Amino acid sequence: MNHYQILIIGGGNAGLSVASQLLLKNKNLQIGIVEPSEKHYYQPAWTLVGAGAFDIAKTEKKEADYIPQNTTWIKEAVATFSPEKNTVTCTNGTEITYDYLVVCPGIQLDWKKIDGLTETLGKNEVSSNYSFNTAPYTWELIKNFKGGTAVFTNPATPIKCGGAPHKIMYLACDYWRKKGILDQCDVHYVSGAGVIFGVPEYAETLKKKVAQYNIKVHFGANVTAIDGKSKTIFFESKEQPKDLETKFSTLQASCYGITENQAEASISKVSLNFDICHTVPPQSAPDFIKKSPLADANNPLGYVEIDKHTMQHSRFKNIFALGDCTNAPCSKTGAAIRKQARVVVENLLQLIANHPLTASYDGYSACPIPTQYGKLMLAEFDYSNKPKMTFPFDQAKPRWTMWILKTKILPWLYWNKILKGTA
């Protein structure tokens, strides 16, 4: 059968949650799920893996064990969309038609956009928690560090789990503090963002941590290359040379360099030597979405164009999208997906019944940020970047209870409730 009443692209958190919730509402729906991966990963725990606080094996399960009963798993990858014909073509040439389409294949990690990164990742003291294969290596680097220069990067593009690039930095600093070597560690955060966190109330907590750990922050900085053999990172910075001179004054002269006489005076090109480096790749919509009619023509990263409240496609009314692949201006997190899934399910069922769409997503997202081992700040907010706290206490204050939520409760909820549509 190559026709489905509802075709879901992507068998990750979003796709499985939506499929499960739809079937709980109506067990007679004919649903196909297009997903090429044999494995399913609980990626929010990879920061904890990189910090030596979680077993990587517990983040990997068989995809087959979580495909909802009464759906059809199409184990293929998508090549193209033809929304005017209600058709999806897979890379093997198979054409699938649908009445309604839900697009949620996740986000694409653009490792190659940092020159030299793919060649050195997982060796030469360069790691990333954004890869199942290298997250354990991050812990090896942190555990064996004896002092020197540690660099943590964050790209200029939106990314999944926007807090992850600095979560691992706080945990690393706390580990080195406990070992008594933090004063021998020169820690740099090279970030494409303009601030440490977009919600001021939570940012205040993180600013204090940055000061406590004596972290040097470089905002508006775009990493362009990494040379693993010479242990050098290259980035473009909006900081002016005199400011960089001050920031690097504690380093030996050989540790950094600023290219003089640049054509564009507002950008400084900086090279920085490191002893260990945790890097996060730029990210964008998957290529098969970028080049499709579903993409937002005004978005250079190619995200699916939707109404940010109803999650319905702006131009193709029988298509919905959710998760990291959309152009909705929210943080790309599992918590956002959990709220979006309910809206997609409700609005899709209303559309099928020829009723007006009434469910609305307010941009809710949550970012659990550990500031040290055993303490975590749960940042919750919406489109307005205002705090939207669930618990009856000040969530801008890191707490042990929130660490337990992150390390114990949420992983259990994910595998046992969220993917099954009951949470």
Image (cartoon, rainbow, N blue to C red):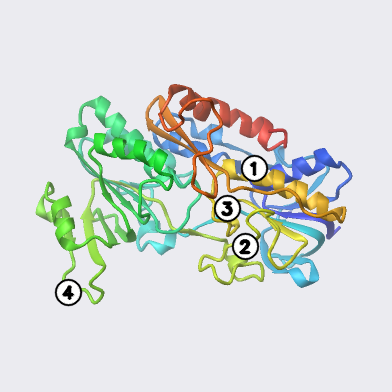
Closest to the camera, between mark 4 and mark 1, is 1
Q: Is 321 on the left or on the right of 366, as rendered? A: right
Instruction: Determine the secondary structure under disc 4.
Output: loop
Q: Read off the residue under disc 3.
A: 324
**Circle nearer the N terminus (2, 4):** 4
Q: Is residue 159 positioned above or below 390 on the image? A: below
x 17%, y 74%: residue: 261
Instruction: Determine the secondary structure under disc 3.
Output: helix
Q: Read off the residue under disc 2.
A: 304
**Circle nearer the N terminus (4, 1):** 4
Three-letter code, disc 3 = Asp
Q: Is 275 on the left or on the right of 382, as rendered? A: left
- Are the residues tagged 4 and 1 within 8 Å (C-beta)? no
Residue 51 in the image, given as x and y percentages of width and height: 39, 34
Q: Read off the residue under disc 4.
A: 261
Q: CA distance from mark 4 to mark 1?
A: 50 Å
Three-letter code, disc 1 = Lys
Closest to the camera, between mark 1 and mark 2, is 1
